[in-house]
Image: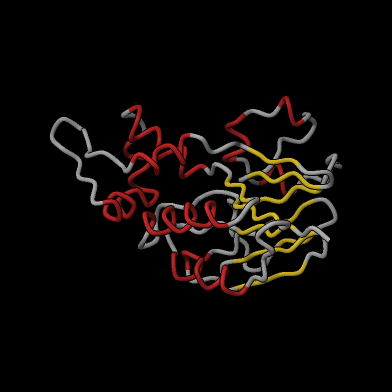
Amino acid sequence: MERTFAIGDIHGCLDQLKGMISLLDIDRERDNLVFVGDYIDRGPDSRGVVDFILDLKRDLKHVVCLRGNHEEMFLDFYLERKNGPLFLRNGGRETLSSYGLKKTAEGKTVDLPDEHLQFLTALPFYFEMEDFIFVHAGLRPGLSLEEQDPYDLLWIRHEFFFSEEEFPKVVVFGHTPFSRPLLEENKIGIDTGAVYGGKLTCIELPDRKIYQV
């Protein structure tokens, strides 16, 4: 049977990501691997994480990488030259250091590898399967998937996971770190604070089997 493995926020923690992938028995042809965003910022090796995920995309047939709010902040900073203080105080300095990027007097930085920039700019906001919706932060209650504001998909917190409203499918999300995975009937939270000294979490669906490194 086809399985789906969803991995929570990585934030530059390459060693934990490598440990997780070595733990999972992923069928290269049949299984799905989904990342819910936040590959960069705060941790020591954002560039290494992106390189590793790009290798996985070449090696595995079904890899889906979603956009997180940290990728959005980085793109705002790098491409639009805006929200610099927000990006820098939320772990952006570690990302710049990982890439060897230096901010100049004109506010410019040296270029990213083309493959990395293409990867980051192409990240979708959500991924939908028959029984699950994968998204970085969550959904605004009362709105259809098509009506969701991209800002909410990347940033929403309490209004989503405290809501008792029924969603059309089980929502698998990251963004908000929990001490252990949040396992509810219609919500699954898999950010367990890897970059803060917690575990990197993966859930195997549909069985809801938890892996942690």
Among the 4 quarters of the image, the one containing residue 136: top right
Quarter of the figure with the C terminus: bottom right
Q: Nearer the viewer, residue 131 or 55?
A: 55
Among the 4 quarters of the image, the one containing residue 110: top left
Q: Nearer the viewer, residue 17 or 27?
A: 27
Extreme left residue here? Answer: 105
Residue sitting at x 67%, y 50% = 173
Q: Nearer the viewer, residue 39 or 157?
A: 39
Q: Residue 11, position in %: x, y?
A: 46, 57
Q: Nearer the viewer, residue 154 or 50?
A: 50
Q: Residue 38, position in %: x, y?
A: 50, 50
Q: Residue 29, position in %: x, y?
A: 69, 57
Among the 4 quarters of the image, the one containing residue 203: bottom right
Residue sitting at x 69%, y 63% = 27
Residue sitting at x 35%, y 30% = 79
Q: Residue 154, position in %: x, y?
A: 57, 39
Vertical order, 75 against 147 (above or below): below
Left or right: 107, with 92 as reference point: left
